[in-house]
Image: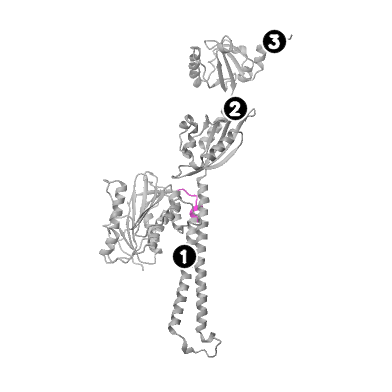
């Protein structure tokens, strides 16, 4: 029978470093692998303190753990990782498990270590990349019960603290939209079974704001077994928003062109029919030699001419509307193409620019008056808002001023804004405000009465446009604010409102609608920039970058254009 192999020979053949320590932490035995790992011969280290070569930052922790073990404690469930000095003075990372004497039958504590330097360096490179990335890098165990790695981006994308996720690895599922949760769980099962997965799904509640993420994952396979799953998650909300915006533009344009061209086609047919009637009344176009010119009815001719003029005006109006729609579409496309970030701007000149656009575009003269901003801090913002609306409906403000001046037929615009307020917003905020005011002017069934009110808080600037128009239809409001998808049954023709919504959205703000029997309140909210001390990108109220607001008023009407005191004299320009 062959002799049993020498245990020391077998130990020297293994790839892991094997060492035996006594109760004082001194080396009693090491296998030959120590030379490949640390550069020392085993006999050079036998009898020396095993902790003498541990990195100073790790030595105290390892000594405390070893002391706990020899005092009767159990070795930790997870291996210990630490740095160890080599014969050349470099440092290597070791991962070590401790086995007790009663477990091995060896007189001493057996330490089995593996060189993980390459793994640690790779992980550090990954951590460096992950720390600078807006994507979420993640790694879970194959059963998803243990989180092995996550970077800080998970807080921005999923709204979850990394430490909380480490304690509760399934916590990220709570952020998944309820409708998409089964889809996500099936993808997790595929990864655990060894298949790759790439999915897009939503984060958020069923009735709240949603965010789209794209997740790409792959299984980690060792020796034919899935040991972990890893991948990354990317916020693709902007991509989905752009797709939605393009779909909206396409739907709006097709819907508008189809409706307007139907009107043009029907009107052209009526014109053709009336021309045929005219030819029947024209003696020169008649083949009847016995045509009696005295039978021509002047009233019929007048009626015919009036009908033709009306039809021609209809075609002109529809063509003008189509051109306006095309111009607004171009404005929306230009906005969507812009990659610039929001910047700090003063609100006063923005509001004045908006008023200038309204006056320039409106065919009728407009009376614009100014009010001092409310300084009532004794009530909540909601209570102040309700009070303002009640006073507006009761006739306070613009309508009352107009009646007092005997000028109730002109559109009335009342304006109030804090002179020093600053917003952090997209540059097209003035366009958005002008669009809201022009909508109110267009849809009022009686003399338009519009109230522009800007309020500033620490966090936000709110621009409220109050009108006396019929309530905005619910389908219009819900489509604009993403609560309904636009389809063949639900359209909104308000391309301008879409522009307003996207200006708010891209500025990190919001657009809200509040409808009443006597009118609407549309509020455009954007972040406040008053806490930002930089003036580099500030938009100043000066004649170089905004037109002066002009209105039609009484000879002594005073118009504020630069946030100055109402007591300061102001000239009034008139434009018909």
Residue density around tag 2, few if under 14, some if 14–19, many if 20 or more, within 10 Å: few
316 inside magenta stretch? no
Of mark 3 and mark 1, the one earlier in the sequence is: 3
- Residue 313 figure quarter: bottom left
337 inside magenta stretch? yes
Q: Which residue is mark 2?
A: 118
Q: Which residue is mark 1?
A: 321
Identify the image quadrant of the N terminus: top right
In the rendered structure, find residue 4 and report the number of the disc placed on it: 3
- The x and y percentages for residue 393 are 30, 57
Which residue is at the front of the view, 180 or 572? 180
> In the image, which residues are magenta?
333-341
Applied colour scheme: one colour
Is residue 544 at all visible to an observer of this figure? no
- The x and y percentages for residue 284 are 53, 86
Element type where label 2 sits in the image: helix
Using the numbered discs, state the Cα–Cα distance from disc 1 to disc 2 in whole angstroms.
68 Å
- The x and y percentages for residue 540 are 38, 53
Residue density around tag 3, few if under 14, some if 14–19, many if 20 or more, within 10 Å: few
Q: Nearer the viewer, mark 1 or mark 2?
A: 1
């Amino acid at each position: 029978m062959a002799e049993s192999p020498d245990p020391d020979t077998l130990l020297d053949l293994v790839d892991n470093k094997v060492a035996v320590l006594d109760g004082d932490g001194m080396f009693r035995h090491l296998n030959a692998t120590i030379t490949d790992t640390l550069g020392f011969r085993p006999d050079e280290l036998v009898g020396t303190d095993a902790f003498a070569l541990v990195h100073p930052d790790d030595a105290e922790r390892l000594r405390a753990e070893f002391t706990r073990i020899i005092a009767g404690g159990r070795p930790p469930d997870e291996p210990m990782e630490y740095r160890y000095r080599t014969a050349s003075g470099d440092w290597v990372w070791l991962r070590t498990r401790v086995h007790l004497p009663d477990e091995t039958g060896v007189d001493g504590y057996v330490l089995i270590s593996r060189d993980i330097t390459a793994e640690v360096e790779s992980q550090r490179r990954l951590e460096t990349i992950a720390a600078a990335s807006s994507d979420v890098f993640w790694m879970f165990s194959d059963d998803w019960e243990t989180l092995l790695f996550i970077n800080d981006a998970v807080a921005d994308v999923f709204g979850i603290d990394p430490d909380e996720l480490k304690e509760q690895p399934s916590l990220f599922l709570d952020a998944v939209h309820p409708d998409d949760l089964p889809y996500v769980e099936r993808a997790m099962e595929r990864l655990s079974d060894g298949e790759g997965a790439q999915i897009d799904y939503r984060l958020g509640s069923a009735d709240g704001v949603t965010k789209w993420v794209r997740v790409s994952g792959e299984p980690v396979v060792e020796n034919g077994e899935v040991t972990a799953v890893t991948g990354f998650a990317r916020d693709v909300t902007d991509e989905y928003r752009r797709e939605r915006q393009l779909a909206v533009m396409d739907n709006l344009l097709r819907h508008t062109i189809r409706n307007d061209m139907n009107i043009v086609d029907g009107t052209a047919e009526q014109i053709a029919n009336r021309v045929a009637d005219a030819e029947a009344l024209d003696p020169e176009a008649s083949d009847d030699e016995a045509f009696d010119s005295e039978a021509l009815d002047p009233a019929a001719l007048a009626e015919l001419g009036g009908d033709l003029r009306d039809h021609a005006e209809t075609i002109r109006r529809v063509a003008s509307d189509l051109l306006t729609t095309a111009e607004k579409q171009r404005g929306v496309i230009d906005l969507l193409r812009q990659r610039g970030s929001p910047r700090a701007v003063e609100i006063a000149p923005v509001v004045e620019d908006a008023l200038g656009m309204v006056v320039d575009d409106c065919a009728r003269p407009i009376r614009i008056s100014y009010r001092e901003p409310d300084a009532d801090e004794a009530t909540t913002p909601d209570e102040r808002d309700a009070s303002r609306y009640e006073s507006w409906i009761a006739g306070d403000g613009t309508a009352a001023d107009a009646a007092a001046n005997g000028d109730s037929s002109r559109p009335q615009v009342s304006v109030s804004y804090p002179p020093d307020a600053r917003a952090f917003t997209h540059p097209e905020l003035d366009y958005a405000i002008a669009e809201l005011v022009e909508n109110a002017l267009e849809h009022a069934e009686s003399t338009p009465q519009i109230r522009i009110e800007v309020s500033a808080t620490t966090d936000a600037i709110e621009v409220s446009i109050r009108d006396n128009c019929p309530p905005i239809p619910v389908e219009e409001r819900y489509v604009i604010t993403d609560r309904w998808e636009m389809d063949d049954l639900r359209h909104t023709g308000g391309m301008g409102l879409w522009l307003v919504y996207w200006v708010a959205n891209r500025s990190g703000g919001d657009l809200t609608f509040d409808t009443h029997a006597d009118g609407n309140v549309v509020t455009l909210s954007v972040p406040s920039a008053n806490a930002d001390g930089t003036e580099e990108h500030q938009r100043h109220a000066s004649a170089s970058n905004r037109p002066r607001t002009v209105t039609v008023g009484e000879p002594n009407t005073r118009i504020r254009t630069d946030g100055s005191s109402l007591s300061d004299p102001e000239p009034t320009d008139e434009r018909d």
